């Protein structure tokens, strides 16, 4: 029977890249995230052309615990167990702490950290019961090190690292692994949006943000690709990765080796 993967925040960027990687293995795919009806339908059709499994869109807002719980329950009713859960939804806001809007802090912590608590809480028992489950949390190099002006994001991603390690211990004997991937800069809509913000905050051009801020710490001087992240998730979901548990795995071109 086809396995099922649920990827939060998969209507664009990294999440969509991960969804495509699992679609190519004929998983049932549950995508989630924001976007226009037209964009989402296009994405569903693209994924359907890549998998023999089903493709479902769930509109649950990662700010809302009751919607997250309903999403997990609905998909469990449909597919039995969510075999692979990828907590990927995330937002960013770049600002000095003294100007940081409180509502942005709350939203970043809710979407980037607390939503993963809820998805895991409601899906892990069924994974443990079937003695197989894979939980992959998209943290960030900012789950390991900080950069100025990203207080909420860095706090949330460090939180994701702690959550990952803790849950990895709780069901280690049940065939359920919980790992975090810490990417460096991946050129996605989230990074595109930061370019303008960073340029404004720092008073430099967008080109200078790319060369002197974003990739300055990334020794390879290249952005990571969503395809590389998709392939990494597929490996973590495989039987070969069954002893990788509670690991905080960098894919950052050497950024955090420094
Ligand atoms: P993106 O903006 O392209 O995608 C974010 C996804 O989250 C979208 O599908 C969006 O609709 C969804 N989302 C946002 N708010 C939501 C909400 N309230 N409810 C449901 N879905 C919501 O961003 P991305 O760059 O692909 O980032 C994906 C993840 O990877 C994030 O957790 C991000 O922090 C992390 N990450 C990104 C980079 C990078 O350089 N792009 C680096 C390290 C980590």
Image (tube, helix red, strand yellow):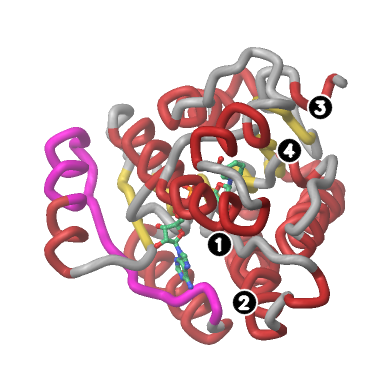
Residue 49 is covered by the magenta coloring: yes
Q: Disc number at residue 141?
A: 4
Asked if ligand 1 lies within 8 A of label 1, the reply is yes
Residue on which the image places disc 2: 107
Residue 94 visible in the shown view:
yes
Residue of label 3: 256
- Relative height, residue 218 to residue 200 (above, below): above
Q: Quadrant of the C terminus?
A: top right
Q: Is mark 2 within 8 Å of ligand 1?
A: yes
Q: Could you tell whether 246 is left or right of 64 in the image?
A: right
Frontmost residue, 90 versus 132: 90
Left or right of 156, for residue 135: left
Q: Is mark 4 within 8 Å of ligand 1?
A: yes
User: Is 169 located above or below residue 150 in the figure?
Assistant: above
Which residue is at 51% across, 29% downward? Answer: 229
Q: Residue at x 52, y 73 (%)?
A: 62
Give the camera-side residue of 48 and 217: 217
Q: Badge 4: how crowded within 10 Å, few (<14), some, or many (20+)?
A: many
Q: CA distance from mark 4 to mark 1?
A: 15 Å
Q: Secondary structure at mark 3?
A: helix
Q: What distance separates the C-alpha of mark 1 from that of mark 2?
A: 8 Å
Sequence-wise, the earlier of marks 4 and 3 is 4
Q: Report the Cα–Cα distance between label 2 and label 4.
A: 20 Å
């Amino acid at each position: 029977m086809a396995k099922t993967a649920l990827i939060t925040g998969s209507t664009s960027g990294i999440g969509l890249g991960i969804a495509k990687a699992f679609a190519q293995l004929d998983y049932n795919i549950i995508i989630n995230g924001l976007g226009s009806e037209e964009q989402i339908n296009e994405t569903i059709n693209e994924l359907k052309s890549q998998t023999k499994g089903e493709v479902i869109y769930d509109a649950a807002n990662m700010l809302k615990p009751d919607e997250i719980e309903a999403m997990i329950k609905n998909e469990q009713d449909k597919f039995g167990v969510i075999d692979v859960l990828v907590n990927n939804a995330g937002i960013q806001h770049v600002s000095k702490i003294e100007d940081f809007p409180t509502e942005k802090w709350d939203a970043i912590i809710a979407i980037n950290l607390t939503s993963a608590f809820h998805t895991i809480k409601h899906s892990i028992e069924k994974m443990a019961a079937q003695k197989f489950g894979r939980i992959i949390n998209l943290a960030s190099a900012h789950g390991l090190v900080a950069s100025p002006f990203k207080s909420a994001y860095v706090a949330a991603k460090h939180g994701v690292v702690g959550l990952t390690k803790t849950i990895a211990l709780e069901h280690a004997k049940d065939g359920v692994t919980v790992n975090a991937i810490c990417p460096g800069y991946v050129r996605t809509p989230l990074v595109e949006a930061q370019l303008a913000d960073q340029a404004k905050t720092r008073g430099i051009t967008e080109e200078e943000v790319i060369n002197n801020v974003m990739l300055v710490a990334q020794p390879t001087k290249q952005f990571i690709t969503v395809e590389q992240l998709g392939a990494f998730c597929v490996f973590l979901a495989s039987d070969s990765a069954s002893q990788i548990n509670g690991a905080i795995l960098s894919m950052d071109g050497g950024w955090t080796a420094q």
